[in-house]
Amino acid sequence: MDMNQYKQRLLELETRLSARAAREREGARGQVLDTPGDMGDASVADEGQSEDFAEGELDATVLQQVRDALKRIDSGTYGRCVVDGRPIEPKRLEAAPWTPYCLKHQTQVEQDAQQKTPTL
Ligand SMILES: [Zn+2]
């Protein structure tokens, strides 16, 4: 496996995601400050804000995973599932170089997350 290639991609991602996160924080602040007195406009601004927030949350999760992946490259455990230590499928790494799980455990983690979410 060409570690440097993955490291390069991860470093670029980290730069891009943290720059975007910083921009979004500024944008969110701007929206709050610029909220007009008119109720109609305010509700539109609120909707836009919650969408940005959801996207920002996703970025924050990926950014954390990207940083963890960079640490794993440095410690020499990159490319292995953090649960069972087995090699992660190359196609998964190609598509999402920050992924900490093999396909089996990714599926398991997602199922666990769904079960924790109360479905009413
Ligand atoms: Zn695994």
Image (spheres, grey):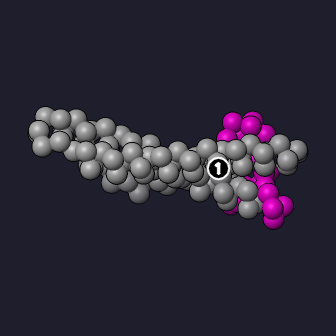
Which sits in the foreground, 51 or 28? 28
Q: Residue at (76%, 60%) from the top-left corner?
A: 72
- Span of residues in magenta: 73-97
Q: Residue at (81%, 65%) from the top-left corner?
A: 75
The answer to whether residue 24 is magenta is no
Q: Residue at (66%, 57%) from the top-left corner?
A: 67
Taking 28 as reference, is 69 left or right?
right
Q: Local crowd at mark 1 within 10 Å, few (<14), some, or many (≥20)?
A: many
Taking 6 as reference, is 54 left or right?
left
Q: Position of residue 44 (x, y in %)?
A: 22, 35
Q: Name the quadrant of the N terminus.
A: top right
Which sits in the foreground, 119 or 3? 3
Secondary structure mostly seen in the magenta stretch: loop
For label 1, the residue is 14
Q: Amino acid at mark 1?
A: Glu
Which sits in the foreground, 19 or 89? 19
**Residue 65 location, quadrant:** bottom right
Eyeballing the image, is 18 above or below 47? Answer: below
Eyeballing the image, is 70 above or below 54? Answer: below
Q: Is residue 97 visible?
A: no
What secondary structure is marked by label 1?
helix
Q: Position of residue 20 (x, y in %)?
A: 52, 45
Residue located farthest toward the right when viewing the structure as drawn: 1
Q: Is residue 47 visible?
A: yes
Q: Residue at (71%, 55%) from the top-left corner?
A: 69
Q: Position of residue 13 (x, y in %)?
A: 66, 44
Q: Position of residue 92 (x, y in %)?
A: 71, 39
- Label 1 beta carbon within 8 A of ligand 1: no
Taking 63 as reference, is 98 left or right?
right
The answer to whether residue 94 is magenta is yes
Which sits in the foreground, 114 or 92? 92
